[in-house]
Amino acid sequence: MLLLVDLDNTLIDRAAAFNAWSTDFVHLLGQPVSEAAWLIGADRDGYEARDSLARAVKERYSLDASVEDLVERLLFEHVDSMNIELATMQALTNARADGWRIAVVTNGSTSQQTLKIQTVGLEPYVDAVVISESVGVKKPDTEIFRIAARQLGLGLTGGWMVGDHPVADIAGGQAAGLETGWVSRGKEWPVEIPLPTLASETAAEIINAIVRQNVKVS
């Protein structure tokens, strides 16, 4: 049984870590705390390209630092603040005990995403990790889901994709023929995209629901 799970803002709270870092960053620049809201918005929940965001930061605050140095800061300085909740670890443990094979499927740079996984201690709870930069394709492209399934020795039929992004995770998973679980984080579902199979506020709740129902596609 195949269970594919997103990393950022699904298994780990990337937003909280980046938001806290943003507040510290603008404070160190001597900017008002309100400037953190601009940086958080410009980040677009991590979906703004790091070099693009770095250039915007450099221009807005007239910084002497190079774009390359700012990219490094944007990529790595907030990672130490990340953690994985006990409920999420328990849900993953329960799923594997029930026979599910689990792969993390995440967009992003190999170095950053690997560091996140190591920092929160996620490795013992999953069977594989597929990072877009490493495999040369990113969500919502259906090929990344097929790659993850192959790494687990499984097909996509009967599998699930769990994530927080309506397009990258849910629409991408649907296009691959997967059942989908949306981690809503308290947000409203965008009406223009077909509904996910399941929705709840946290990954733990979604994974537990999948395990309890043991829902499979016929």
Image: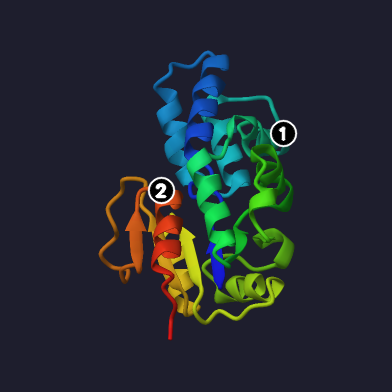
Is residue 142 found left or right of 185 in the rendered image? Answer: right
Is residue 160 found left or right of 137 in the rendered image? Answer: left
Kindly identify which residue carries mark 2.
202
| Residue lying furthest front | 97
2 or 1: tag closer to the N-terminus: 1
Q: Quadrant of the C terminus?
A: bottom left
Above-or-below relation of 139 to 50: below
Quarter-wise, where is residue 138 in the image? Answer: bottom right
Q: For this rendering, which residue is in front, 91 or 35?
A: 91
Kindly identify which residue carries mark 1.
69
Above-or-below relation of 82 to 161: above
Between disc 2 and disc 1, the foreground one is 2
How far from the left and from the top, in percent, is residue 46? Answer: 52, 46
| Residue lying furthest top | 30
Report the disc number at residue 207.
none
Residue at image position (72%, 33%) is: 69
Q: Amino acid at mark 1?
A: Asp
Give the CA separation, mark 2 to mark 1.
34 Å
Above-or-below relation of 199 to 58: below
